[in-house]
Image: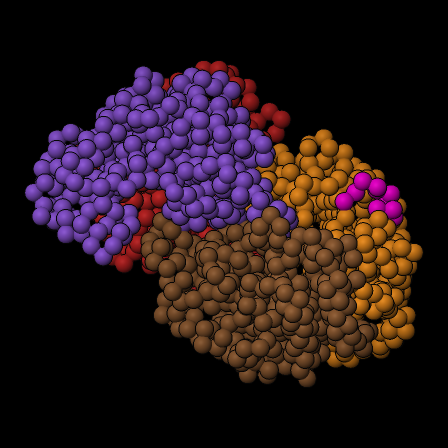
Chain colours: A brown, B orange, C purple, D red
Amino acid sequence: MYSFRNDYSEGAHPRVLQRLVDTNLTQTCGYALDPMSDAARETIRRVCGAPEADVHFLSGGTQTNLLTIAAFLRPFEAVIAPATAHISLHEAGAIEATGHKVCAVETPDGKLTPAMVEAVLDAHPDEFMVRPKMVYIADTTELGTIYTKAELTALRRCCDAHGLYLGLDGARLGSALTAPGNDLALPDLAALTDAFYIGGTKNGALFGEALVLRRPIDHFRWHMKQRGATLAKGRLMALQFQALLEDGLYFEIARHANDMALRLRRGMAELGYEFPLPSPSNQQFPVLPNTVARQLEELGYQFEPERVIDADHTCVRFVTSWATPPSAVDEFLRDLAACK
Amino acid sequence: MYSFRNDYSEGAHPRVLQRLVDTNLTQTCGYALDPMSDAARETIRRVCGAPEADVHFLSGGTQTNLLTIAAFLRPFEAVIAPATAHISLHEAGAIEATGHKVCAVETPDGKLTPAMVEAVLDAHPDEFMVRPKMVYIADTTELGTIYTKAELTALRRCCDAHGLYLGLDGARLGSALTAPGNDLALPDLAALTDAFYIGGTKNGALFGEALVLRRPIDHFRWHMKQRGATLAKGRLMALQFQALLEDGLYFEIARHANDMALRLRRGMAELGYEFPLPSPSNQQFPVLPNTVARQLEELGYQFEPERVIDADHTCVRFVTSWATPPSAVDEFLRDLAACK
Amino acid sequence: MYSFRNDYSEGAHPRVLQRLVDTNLTQTCGYALDPMSDAARETIRRVCGAPEADVHFLSGGTQTNLLTIAAFLRPFEAVIAPATAHISLHEAGAIEATGHKVCAVETPDGKLTPAMVEAVLDAHPDEFMVRPKMVYIADTTELGTIYTKAELTALRRCCDAHGLYLGLDGARLGSALTAPGNDLALPDLAALTDAFYIGGTKNGALFGEALVLRRPIDHFRWHMKQRGATLAKGRLMALQFQALLEDGLYFEIARHANDMALRLRRGMAELGYEFPLPSPSNQQFPVLPNTVARQLEELGYQFEPERVIDADHTCVRFVTSWATPPSAVDEFLRDLAACK
Amino acid sequence: MYSFRNDYSEGAHPRVLQRLVDTNLTQTCGYALDPMSDAARETIRRVCGAPEADVHFLSGGTQTNLLTIAAFLRPFEAVIAPATAHISLHEAGAIEATGHKVCAVETPDGKLTPAMVEAVLDAHPDEFMVRPKMVYIADTTELGTIYTKAELTALRRCCDAHGLYLGLDGARLGSALTAPGNDLALPDLAALTDAFYIGGTKNGALFGEALVLRRPIDHFRWHMKQRGATLAKGRLMALQFQALLEDGLYFEIARHANDMALRLRRGMAELGYEFPLPSPSNQQFPVLPNTVARQLEELGYQFEPERVIDADHTCVRFVTSWATPPSAVDEFLRDLAACK
């Protein structure tokens, strides 16, 4: 039975993996200082419409987040993020381990607004408190929701008004940028944030995230090395992003993941299940009676609990990916329909 | 022309890469909690003769070193290492960034002795100084030298006598364990160290190091997550180590790398070049007249300077690997012979 | 006009300062390793009924908090505290700067309950999150409220049930232990917490806090030195605590501070002012019309805003101390009565 | 018998302590934001001839060093210091605990030269190494030696040429600036360093160091608070420095300390003892036969071993201070003469 537990249950998209096979025995220098990595960085600058951006390849999301935040902030500075953010809750204190506080904000939908940011600033007026200096959001959010161009632009203006940096966790950026209702594109992100990353791990790469810095940060590669984030064969990630981004594969497969998620959602909705969160992306959060959840698990389906609704119901998370076949969704829906 | 710059100039040994291709579309859960990862851990315990060891897969050497040291030490504790150690010099302060001092010791050959360790302890008697608590060595060392079983046993006894942990950086462990003169094997390392790693990156893997902890450390996976070292698709590294270790491929290709290094050394020695360091492993450090070095570079050969000998001579580093063909060595020697 | 801004507006209680004068030219060794410091530690153990406790003298509250928390926790562990706690909000990220997350809990009155602690534990089940390992409270709290013996005992049981440490910030412990309704004494704190401190700075000392560890922590003095918290003339703090604690001066002057606070509260209440928080201690939080606040400030009185109530009213903080004369309170009340 | 163990064996110079007595009951706001602290900062700017300098009061040397270094450096940057420096050896890893490596340099006399600094820079060329960014010296050094104006100027030029900061640990600055052969004065230090501190603890204050920053550092007070270095009654240190610096007391008593040291040295030299280190300041390092050292200890004299010379001889340290009476030196010399 299919696992909807995550979007990193398989390896890589075959065209991505093939790129590694094709280049396997070519010699290059290490640390992403080679021509293949240069080419991938150039591709990323091109698709981002950002010829002056600095691009770095990192092996995972937590690593990218902690590194970026630690590189931007001075010791007494803090980052503002939603309470549901990966950096707030799901990184085992990785940000704090670099010395920085995460000012966590309660949100209805996992998204920050300028008003929320300003409330945090108001609460931190003097030297007895940390100094919030960076706003850190995710698109999609951890709740599957997405930012609009207007919303992101408003956050940028708020950041400019208050001298804040704006960072964006793009672990599921492919899904965000291809979701119904999205009006953002890579060039918008490159123009509106100080740092964002194009997530590879959850959208077709074996592993890897491509961090895009609007402007080079002084000595960023020193930060990388110091945090253990410099991969010897850095080209491995570059090659994967080259394969994903040079001709649109990244968006094609992300759109597929979303299609599968919406196919699942539509099917479940038709069966009467509710989705309290308005996610248009590849994470869906239906409410299941616990009896139904158990039957599905016994059949071998995998998915994760999100939160308890009441003694008999749980909001769960289903995740689809580039690898999810329509048949797996349809089979699941048939099995779900048969649950009592 | 061949690059002798490093042992990570290519991708992975074809059998390693094939393992990733073969398993690519199989679904598993993430974070190396899947059956493939279990199997690889079991293989590693078996080849180490260490059924109680704890095994973790990490993506690179600096990450493994900083994580291990930070997990073993309390804030005021320090690590003792040779001044030439990777952790002393070549990790951009990664250990210090976790809050720990590296007590660096000058050595003639990159190797620590019990007497050197005890001299450091004597110099740190009280609360005004850090408390050295871990000895951290490498095999092969950064100078290509190796430890004997007697030497490692003596260090272990020294550590036991003084309540110290013993860690070993095995970035080039394959080369060490197959070098002429070596009498250590994986079970010795598992028995004599508290933590060591089997280096994959520099011996046939795309990337990855397998950390072996003699005994599980409390909450080690929390440490990993906090440092950004938990790979979503953790199985990627497990599969590579399975391919490398299940039937001896790891040692077979390491021995090849050493053979190529010694073929190079022999050939250069016959041409009259000197090797001040007694390395029996896949790093060789000949002294070249600068005029010769320049000619080789003009031919397209790649290698790195190690240190200046005098105005006209430089000690350089040549590195061979699992991927170095004998023909590349022979061609190099012919070209070298033709240099004036 | 009198400043009610804080309880550290003056120097030291004259008997405390005299002790420094009397011993000024006596030679001792440094770092609180001298006989005077031994004697003060012995006095503290005696008044705490804790012959096995370990006692350390530190120069301020933030330093004591960060040091204690950093000494107890391993890197991935976190501390649970009220959102209003000094360590959550008012220490410029000092705890995070040692690498640890503060899990901040919203409370109605600045106090933690076992249910709140358990809710945090439930929300941190696995390796992707920090591991809460210490509960950190204050008595009095930052809102002036105090813990009862039953409440503290319940927290201790909760901590024992879940393997947590319990720490207590005693910056205003004198005020807490002499407040109406208090049923705790120093021996209770020594028995029920793993670490607490007897605040000197805010109750009659020039500076200094006496940290009491139920049991010695391994190498605590190394932690102190590493954080810059080892005072060369450590005896200076010991002598002050000796003067404060050997014959009950500490409690006598704390009771005076509370008496002054309640005199102020009674007087203001008679004038019709409201106190939304039920503080029985030396911090009082009346609501003032902004017009009245302004008149008082123009007269030269000093106090701090706590939070905005509405466009016309502010909750403010008045603090009394060992040094507050009854006449200052009475004069203030007369002036307040004259405000329009 | 007199203790020559250190220059912080007593409390404060009586005129310093009297200042605290005189101001004891005056109310001011906290954190050195009061008029008394303003006045002391102004005095310090005046005696330093540095109207634009920023001045901060800190409670001890280790705290001042770690705070200053952490405030100047970015995460991957390191500090260059002599191997004998307090920050290298005697601060329990305080600098590393803020994340920064100390690049320790062997020196003959505890002093850095431009050539030594440049050798460190040469050894740290790329992103695999920390980036040395600050030179940190002490005057007097830990070996009692002092810098000349020419030497300090040369270091400043070296720092300017390489974009380095220059910091100076002035724990014993009074002794340095009044030593025979000294040609530096406070205005030189303010002009030639980016940060230095005027040590109070070891020259007449109860405690406290006055950090002088050539130019204000952004948000330095946030750094202070975060490291637990903001004293509630910050004025306590300001008042002491006011007393020490407003009319030259600081230098008068430092000169006395030096006079006592040289009286001791002269007397011991006349008795045939050797002083291998050329210290002109208040630390003197004679070589004693172990039999003599033992006799002196039995008489009750206190001093510290510096290093073993051979099986029968030890180089020891004698320290004099503002409080050392000539009679104590003379009595010691008589007793020494009587030793066999």
- Above or below: residue B329 compared with residue B219: below
Residue C204: percent from left, percent from top = 28, 29
Side of C23 where D143 appears, left or right: right
Query: Can residue D63 be seen by looking at this rendering?
Result: no
Give the residue displayed 7% in from the left and 43% down from the top: C338
Query: Can residue A286 be seen by looking at this rendering?
Result: yes
Give the residue displayed 57% in from the left and 27% down from the top: D313
Residue D148: percent from left, percent from top = 39, 51
Between A195 and C274, the one lying in front of the other is: C274
Outermost residue to the left: C338
Residue B111: percent from left, percent from top = 74, 47
Between D149 and B261, the one lying in front of the other is: B261
Give the residue displayed 34% in from the left and 58% down from the top: A122
Residue C123: percent from left, percent from top = 56, 47
Between A90 and B296, the one lying in front of the other is: A90
Side of A303 where A223 appears, left or right: left
- Above or below: residue A297 compared with residue C282: below
For the N terminus of chain C, the image quarter is top left
Q: Is D135 within the magenta?
A: no
- Above or below: residue B26 compared with residue C17: below
Give the residue displayed 64% in from the left and 60% down from the top: A317
Q: Which residues are magenta?
A: B44-54
